[in-house]
Image: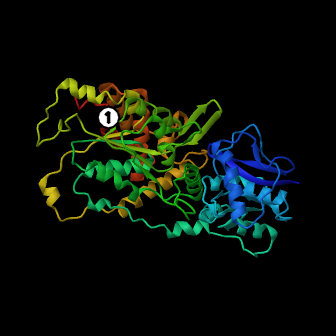
């Protein structure tokens, strides 16, 4: 007998429907899977037969042929175990159901018949709704993830037997539900606070400007001055995510398998801090079957690269295109996938190999050539794509010993949110644009207005400091953000002056 069940699979950040046809016929007792299955899918026949037997069902004594359509796309992973098992039971008439056409099914089977969690449930659930399916059967550990998709009934199951009872209509199960909007109200900001940071007022101001406009930032200073401490507190002043941003981020983490069990949505912006030994594939994504890398896992959040010159040169260079475009495209023989990666880059570095070139208390042991070689590990084109370069100097004793707390993250965050609200209103007619850092040449002409003094200040800075054209654009974007923080419609000379001060490496202060 022939049966058909429906499942789904992930390709890039999107999903596609998979139709699983099972024919139980005569011949030698074996199971054959066709339709470009990978090794994990081919091995499922042994898992499925054992799970069927241990769940109390009879196994077919003849030849069973399983086709995964469309047949021209490679099928990967163990998520087809559950629908294959259901299809085999329907084909050999161990289970009867008139509801199977309404369901999409995914899940890995243990030999005992238990249903285990899988990757990519959220994009598959979104695709199922788009295709007009009414319900989806998922592992219990993936229930919250699938339930954020509105208009789709989600039925979590723990065992194969529970899934068959559901399809037979005998267990009376109600769909699992979750209120996605309620999750935002329950998110708590438990991050470290800027009030804990002693001194470094200029660095704090630069971080506030960077977050307010979504600008990339590089901190340069001797060891122990608080660069990493400052970076880790950025999360406490980031604006809240929208529902659309949360869905985008959760979808990426679902595909990568980094979503915690029973997590419905990622409602706080991610902070990723990869080690400097990471490969270019680990940073951008890749592999035989491309998976998201760190830049995509940091989508709508922060990517922190500590000890920036210690990263391999080729790893840093591959960042140039994602920083500019907000997407990363990975091409393989089997096809091309594109992952979103709109993130805020925060990096930290020492001024020289020994770290003490600008330290007032310790003597630098590096020669000029060593310092230049160290700086050259970061190319000019990459530096041009980092809007803000700031110095983080050593802290004086009186600042360390002070009992006076600094300004709290909550106070800084209020100003950031006010500036972001101005930008949201500014870009409401610009599709896909959320902050000043995302402006292109056309938006700069439309939204950046300089008064006479500001234009003169910028002209003088460009002439004397020999900025590149890209650095010129960065100064305008940062100036626009500083003006937004001040509540000014026009960019004034002091806004330009502050933005120019945030181009430390361009001003050749380190050699």
- Find disc 1 in the rendering and name its residue: 309
Q: Residue 338 in the image: x percent, y percent? A: 60, 38
How is the rendered protein coloured? rainbow
Rendered view: 65 above or below 49 = above
Which one is in front, 29 or 173?
Answer: 29
Residue drawn at 11 percent across, 37 percent down: 363
Q: Is residue 341 visible?
A: yes
Q: Residue 8 in the image: x percent, y percent? A: 71, 51
Residue drawn at 47 percent across, 55 percent down: 269
Which one is in front, 439 or 160?
Answer: 160
Q: Find numbered disc 1 in the image and state the secondary structure of the residue it sits on.
A: helix
Identify the image quadrant of the C terminus: top left
Res 494 → quadrant: top left
Q: Residue 315 in the image: x percent, y percent? A: 42, 33
Rendered view: 279 above or below 230 = above
Which one is in front, 172 or 241?
Answer: 172
Rendered view: 23 above or below 191 = above
Residue drawn at 81 percent across, 69 percent down: 168
């Amino acid at each position: 007998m022939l049966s058909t069940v429906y499942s789904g699979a992930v390709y890039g950040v999107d999903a596609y429907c998979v139709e699983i046809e099972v024919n139980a016929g005569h011949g030698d007792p074996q199971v054959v899977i066709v339709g470009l299955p990978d090794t994990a899918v081919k091995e499922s026949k042994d898992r499925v037969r054992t799970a069927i037997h241990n769940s109390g069902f009879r196994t077919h004594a003849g030849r069973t042929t399983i086709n995964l359509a469309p047949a021209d796309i490679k099928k990967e992973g163990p998520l087809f175990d559950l629908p294959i098992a259901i299809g085999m039971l329907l084909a050999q008439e161990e289970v009867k159901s008139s509801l199977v056409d309404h369901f999409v099914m995914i899940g890995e089977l243990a030999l005992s018949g238990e249903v285990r969690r899988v990757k990519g449930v959220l994009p598959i659930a979104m695709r199922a709704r788009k295709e007009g399916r009414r319900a989806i059967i998922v592992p219990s550990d993936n229930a919250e993830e699938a339930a954020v998709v509105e208009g789709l009934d989600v039925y979590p199951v723990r065992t194969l037997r529970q899934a068959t009872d559901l399809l037979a209509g005998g267990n009376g199960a109600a769909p699992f539900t979750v209120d996605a909007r309620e999750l935002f109200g329950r998110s708590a900001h438990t991050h470290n606070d800027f009030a804990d940071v002693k001194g470094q007022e200029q660095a704090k101001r630069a971080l506030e400007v960077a977050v307010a406009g979504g600008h990339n930032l590089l901190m340069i200073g001797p060891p122990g001055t608080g660069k990493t401490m400052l970076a880790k507190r950025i999360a406490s002043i980031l604006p809240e995510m929208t529902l659309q941003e949360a869905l985008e981020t959760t979808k990426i983490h679902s595909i990568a398998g980094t979503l915690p069990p029973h997590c419905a949505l990622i409602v706080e912006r991610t902070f990723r801090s990869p080690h400097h030994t990471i490969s270019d594939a680990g940073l951008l994504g890749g592999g035989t079957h491309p998976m998201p890398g760190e830049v995509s896992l940091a989508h709508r959040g922060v990517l922190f690269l500590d000890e920036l010159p210690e990263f391999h040169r080729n790893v840093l260079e591959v960042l140039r295109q994602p920083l500019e475009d907000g997407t990363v495209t990975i091409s393989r023989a089997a096809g091309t996938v594109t992952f979103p990666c709109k993130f805020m880059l925060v990096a930290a570095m020492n001024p020289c190999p020994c770290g003490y070139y600008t330290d007032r208390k310790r003597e630098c042991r590096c020669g000029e050539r060593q310092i230049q070689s160290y700086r050259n590990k970061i190319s000019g084109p990459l530096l041009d794509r980092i809007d803000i370069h700031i110095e983080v100097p050593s802290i004086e004793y009186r600042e360390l010993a002070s009992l006076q707390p600094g300004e709290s993250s909550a106070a800084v965050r209020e100003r950031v949110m006010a500036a972001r609200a101005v930008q949201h209103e500014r870009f409401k007619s610009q599709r896909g644009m959320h902050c000043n850092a995302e402006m292109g040449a056309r938006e700069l002409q439309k939204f950046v207005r300089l008064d006479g003094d500001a234009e003169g200040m910028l002209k003088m800075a460009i002439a004397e400091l020999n900025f590149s054209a890209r650095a010129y654009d960065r100064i305008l974007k940062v100036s626009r953000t500083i003006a937004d923080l001040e509540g000014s419609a026009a960019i004034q000379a002091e806004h330009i002056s502050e933005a120019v001060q945030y181009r430390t490496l361009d001003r050749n202060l380190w050699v």
